[in-house]
């Protein structure tokens, strides 16, 4: 490269060669100086690095083949937790009955309504909101490894549950929490004829509640802390909660869909299912039927409709047949190690 002094000389020659004519136009004229083109070429050549052989030619395809592509790590999935014993359909999907019974072959769950101190019945919780709220509370208890869950507000609990805050949802959240606190739960787990595990009691040990009663049983509820019953926490939740992908679970838009995907994500996992299994509709009605008086034909019609929606929406591998359904093994959404003592819930 030319030295600094030589570059200055070149620029000075260029400036002095600029002359304006009578019309005001500029013409560049060459003037004699020691900075001739031959001299400049000689100075530039003398400062270049020596190159042996022809200049290298790079092929974009060759560069692409040799370059190492750095893969970004997949974003970590947000998880929710639910024990297998409570994973699906153990609360009513609609209405507010005083007793609700569900069977899962070796397990039976019986929930009954509670009563206020004045003797007024408090019906059972139901619907999608009750499932989302309990799922959120059990998730917090599992993550904190404690039966005590701090609840900042109704709004915060709704956000945990993936629900929007409205006047209606605020009141519904209050009602469902109050009903959960008052209901009684009997959980029977009998893997063999001679062995059984029974839990009998409440799911919550303490909730701060302010009740303002009138003819319509209106009340206000200000949550600060929810404490699971110690026996319920240790026998049902502690070290028994199964992880689920929160994003997938929150796609459910109804209680029926929620119950189905909670069951299918566990039941179709290769951790539990190694080959296709056929399940008849009478077995499915014990778990997903609306009531004991529901006719089998009505159940099959509704169950097939809901299941086909789940197959399409969640990409489940299931054959819907005339005499039942066939579940095919699928990769677990959240791989986990199976703990001893768990049973398959059909």
Image (cartoon, rainbow, N blue to C red):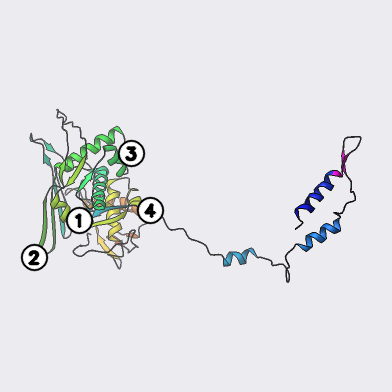
Image point 48% across, 60% down: which residue?
71
Does residue 26 appear to the left or right of 105 in the view shown?
right
Does residue 266 appear to the left or right of 120 in the view shown?
right
Residue situated furthest bottom in the rendering: 53
Q: Position of residue 124 (x, y in %)?
A: 17, 42
Q: Quadrant of residue 318?
A: bottom left
Of the two numbered discs 2 and 1 on the same chain, state the one appearing first in sequence. 2
Of the two numbered discs 2 and 3 on the same chain, state the one appearing first in sequence. 3
Front position in the image: 258 or 59: 59
* Pair 4/1: label in front: 1
**Residue corresponding to mark 2:** 194
Neighbourhood count class around disc 4 (C-alpha, 10 Å): few under 14, some 14–19, many 20 upward = few
**Residue corresponding to mark 4:** 312
Of the two numbered discs 2 and 4 on the same chain, state the one appearing first in sequence. 2
Q: Position of residue 246 (x, y in %)?
A: 33, 51
* Pair 3/1: label in front: 1
């Amino acid at each position: 490269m030319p030295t600094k002094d030589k570059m200055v000389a070149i620029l000075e020659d260029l400036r002095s060669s600029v002359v304006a004519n009578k019309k005001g136009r500029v013409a560049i004229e060459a003037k004699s100086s020691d900075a001739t083109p031959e001299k400049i070429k000689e100075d530039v050549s003398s400062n270049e690095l020596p190159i042996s052989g022809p200049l290298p030619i790079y092929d974009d395809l060759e560069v692409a083949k040799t370059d190492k592509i750095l893969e970004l790590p997949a974003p970590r999935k947000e998880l929710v937790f639910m024990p297998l014993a409570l994973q699906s359909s153990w609360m009513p999907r609609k209405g507010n009955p005083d007793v609700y019974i569900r069977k899962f072959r070796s397990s039976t769950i019986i929930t009954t309504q509670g009563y206020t101190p004045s003797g007024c019945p408090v019906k059972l919780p139901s619907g999608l909101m009750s499932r989302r709220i309990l799922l959120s509370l059990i998730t917090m208890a599992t993550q904190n490894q404690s039966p005590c869950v701090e609840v900042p507000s109704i709004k915060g609990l709704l956000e945990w549950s993936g629900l929007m805050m409205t006047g209606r949802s605020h009141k519904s959240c209050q009602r469902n929490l109050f009903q959960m606190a008052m209901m009684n739960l009997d959980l029977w787990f009998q893997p063999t004829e001679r062995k059984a595990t029974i839990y009998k009691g409440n799911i919550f040990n303490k909730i701060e509640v302010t009740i303002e009663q009138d003819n319509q049983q209106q009340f206000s509820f200000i949550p600060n802390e929810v404490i699971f019953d110690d026996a319920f926490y240790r026998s049902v939740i502690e070290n028994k909660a199964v992880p689920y992908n929160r994003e997938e679970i929150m796609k459910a838009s109804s209680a029926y869909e929620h119950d189905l995907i909670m069951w299918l994500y566990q039941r179709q996992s290769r951790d539990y299912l190694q080959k296709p299994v056929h399940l008849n509709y009478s077995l499915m009605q014990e778990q997903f039927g609306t009531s004991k008086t529901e006719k089998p034909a009505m159940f099959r019609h509704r169950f097939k409709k809901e299941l086909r929606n789940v197959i399409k929406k969640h990409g489940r591998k299931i054959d819907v047949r005339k005499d039942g359904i066939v579940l095919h093994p699928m990769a677990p959404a959240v791989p986990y190690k199976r703990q001893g003592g768990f049973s398959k819930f059909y």
